[in-house]
Amino acid sequence: MNIFTYITGIATLIGLFLQLKNVFPKYKELRKKITLVALGLFIGTLLGGIRIVQFNLSFGRSPDEFLKFLCVCVGIIILLILILSSVFVKDSGRRDELFLFTLFAMFIIPVAIGCIFLLNNPKDLNLDELKYIVDYHEKNKNYDRAIQILEIMKSKVDPNDLRLELIDKKISSIKVEQIKGSNQN
């Protein structure tokens, strides 16, 4: 199961709780629709194995994995605070506004966290996408990053693949450019 499955499952449980308690009678129909959408997404991810936002929450191997875990925890805590505060606010006008903001946040926070890690993980990209990134960094004279991406490309290529030799040549040429650039300064 992935993080999107957990989030939709929690959103469904919260929606069912709000429906049973009839917390916001003014938004009964809206709550019902949102709960059904969350339930549908939850069942869909369970049955279809949709990989929208998925990353390993095990931490201890690298600081990056611990950061992922920490971001997910902070997101869950923010959502819980918003949900609890929207339930216990006395003023009905403020409660309704907070409820709508909480619904909005329940969909935005997971997507934001997922985007942060999907964009920062070049290991999930294919070779063509990695080559595009290498070309970008080389053009902008960010040689260290280009070499890092090329090393990732090497790890994705079979040891008997002809492209491995081309990647090694590219690394060598970038190192030469890097040395030339440092000598000019």
Image (cartoon, rainbow, N blue to C red):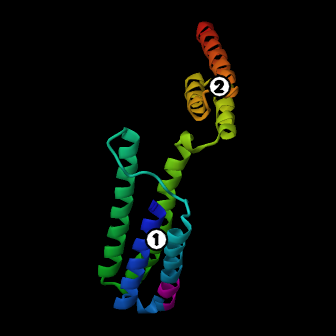
Q: In the image, what residue occupies the spot 62% across and 32% down?
A: 157
Q: Going by the image, does 169 lie left or right of 11? A: right
What secondary structure is marked by label 1?
A: helix
In which quadrant of the rendered view does residue 61 lie? top left
> Which numbered circle lies on residue 164?
2
**Residue 102 visible in the displayed image:** no
Task: Answer whether residue 60 is magenta in the image.
Answer: no
> Which numbered circle lies on residue 16?
none
Residue 171 image position (x, y, % from top left) = 62, 20
Residue 78 image position (x, y, % from top left) = 36, 63
Q: Is residue 108 above or below residue 11?
A: above
**Most frequent secondary structure within the magenta stretch:** helix
First of labels 1, 2 by sequence position: 1
What secondary structure is marked by label 2?
A: helix
Q: Which residues are magenta?
A: 29-33
- Residue at image mark 1: 8
Amino acid on which disc 1 is placed: Thr
Q: In the image, what residue occupies the spot 46% across and 71% down?
A: 8
